Image (cartoon, rainbow, N blue to C red):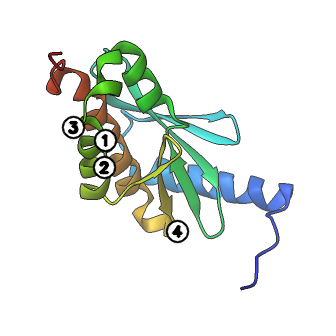
Amino acid sequence: MTTKPPLSAWAKEVAQFAAQASLRNQLPKLFHCAPARNGISITTPLIADDGTLIQVFMEPSDPGVRLTDYGETLGQLELRHPHLASNPNYPAAVAEIIKGLSLENNDGCIELASPDPEELAGDVIRLAQGILQLSSLGQLIPHQRE
């Protein structure tokens, strides 16, 4: 198994610029892109269960880009609804949403690899849909009676 060398800083910057330009052409003006962390923050018009706008973060990857929530969705959900940790239905509900949208749960970070620039806007929306569905689990999964 061969490993690819890490992207150079210049290659990351070029990839980030190209991805941001591609997004501007694909997404409606309701989506706002701004530099953030290791890439770009994309604020969507979708509203999470707690009333905040859903954000997706994009960072360069090889190939393409990786879309992530940096763990904010499940972290905030479990802070606002501590009863979920003891509910046996919670892990299955999370897994079902992630599988249904072909997303990944990487140690609590909801992620999606997006290797094709032509599919980037659709991938942003798919990850945002997953975040939206996950954010509502606190209301959908009842407290366990002891």
Q: Residues within 10 Å of mark 1 (few under 14, many from 20)?
A: few
The residues bearing labels 1 and 2 have C-alpha atoms spaced at a distance of 6 Å
Please provide percent x and percent y for residue 104: 43, 55
The residue positioned farthest toward the bottom in the image shown: 1
Q: Which residue is mark 2?
A: 95
Q: Which mark is residue 89?
A: 3
Vertical arrangement, residue 76 with respect to residue 101, above or below? above
The residues bearing labels 2 and 4 have C-alpha atoms spaced at a distance of 23 Å
At a point 85% along the width and 61% down the height, the residue shown is 8
Q: Nearer the viewer, residue 78 or 144?
A: 144
Q: Which residue is mark 1?
A: 91
Vertical arrangement, residue 93 with respect to residue 84, above or below? below
The residues bearing labels 3 and 4 have C-alpha atoms spaced at a distance of 33 Å
Please provide percent x and percent y for residue 81: 32, 16
The label nearer to you, 1 versus 4, is: 1
Q: Which residue is mark 4?
A: 115
